[in-house]
Amino acid sequence: MDSHPGVELYKLGIGNTTEAIVPSVIEGLRKGVEKLSKRKTYTGYGDEQGDTRLRQAISKWYAERGADIDSSEVFVSDGAKSDCANITAIFSDDAAVAISDPGYPVHREASIISGKRVVSMECPEKNNFMPRMPKEKVDLLYICSPNNPTGTAATKKQLRSYVAYARKHKAIIIFDAAYSEYIGDPKLPRSIYEIKGAKSCAIEIQSLSKAAGFTGVRLGWTIVPQELQTEDSGEGMLNRFWNRRQTTMFNGASNIAQEGALAVLSAQGQRQTHKQVAYYMENARIIRDGLSAARMTIFGGVDAPYIWLKVPDGLSSWGFFDELLEKAHVITTPGVVFGENGEGYMRLSAFGHREDIERAVRSIRKNFGAIPIKRS
């Protein structure tokens, strides 16, 4: 920034939480630390699958959402990112994997690294940026809802169509639900298991990173139902494969983090973390209202903490990134980073301190005002 001394940058780019972890969860984490300070309560290695108490609490959490998940189907981890990357290890090397475009880069990159054949699923604006069904038969489908980066959430009708495809072709859906706590519309599903038949064809990956500010604490889980089946595997096999993978290559999530997770899932923890989620969603509303006032075309930001912005006519994603940085001093994420079909869009994150979000929006409105937008 030598050419712009003294300039303050406003960060609407990376999706990283900024607000302090809520008091009840801090107390849970503190309890985990205190237990390590006494011989009587000290614990070393735990079950690789996760603390039994936590697995049972997660099972109850799903039951409250209308999903019947047994604790034996719950595998606690150090976050959704690693599970999204590692889950393909239990499938054949020649498996075809369908990836949303635009979509979370880890889904694509991990599939490529593991040697899988990648098939793109276009996520067009007219389909609410949810992926179109693959035209060919695939073995795995990554579905993310609410979607990162577009900030839109799948309806039950859309999820039913993915489940129907998977059951027909004996494929497995890998459902990334890391932002499910941001869904405000009660009609929208928060879990793939709200859809009839999903337990036979879907793995769900969850995280407390954005739901409880655990981006640095690291805690998530993966659900691998006993009744999952593929073309060449019977019931229980994939659950056993994932269990074998985790017990071989993972020593379990931090016992301190798991105490914190138990606090998150408590009644008080849920009230406090939901209030924090509402804080970030108010940030999203401020961004949406500000960009709408500038006559920009936007999507998302209603059931997810991301806003998907259509770039002005004649500019590329990176071109508009430069414009926003140079003129408004706002850092965003070019849509093309999330795949070829992300070209022509930008992702803005609602994670940030309120005052910083407001300054960023004011700067965009001041320096851009009403600008012409490409039309579909």
Image (cartoon, rainbow, N blue to C red):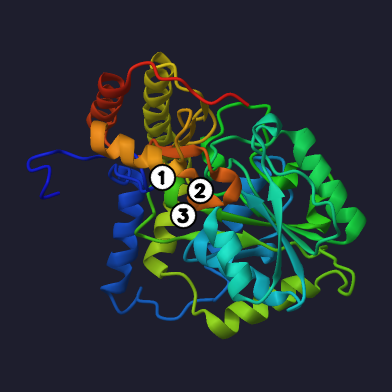
Badge 1 is on which residue?
Answer: 318
Could you tell me the amino acid type at mark 3? Leu
**Contact between labelled residues 1 and 3, with CB atoms less than 8 Å apart:** no
For the residues labelled 3 and 2, the Cα–Cα distance comes to 38 Å
N-terminal label among 3 and 1: 3
**Contact between labelled residues 1 and 2, with CB atoms less than 8 Å apart:** yes
For the residues labelled 2 and 1, the Cα–Cα distance comes to 8 Å
Left or right for 135, reference 56: right
How many tags in the picture? Answer: 3
Question: What residue occupies the far front of the structure in this picture?
Answer: 314
The residue sitting at 49% across, 44% down in the picture is: 335
Left or right for 327, reference 291: left
The percent position of residue 41, horizontal first and vertical second, equals 36, 73
**Quarter of image, res 88:** bottom right
N-terminal label among 2 and 1: 1
The percent position of residue 70, horizontal first and vertical second, equals 71, 59
Asked if residue 204 shows in the view, the reply is yes
- The numbered dot on residue 336 is 2
The residue sitting at 55% across, 53% down in the picture is: 104
Badge 3 is on which residue?
Answer: 262
Q: Is residue 151 above or below residue 187?
A: below
The percent position of residue 193, horizontal first and vertical second, equals 73, 47
Task: Name the mark nearer the viewer: 3 or 2.
Answer: 2
Categorize mark 1 by other alpha carbons within 10 Å: few (<14), some (14-19), many (20+). many
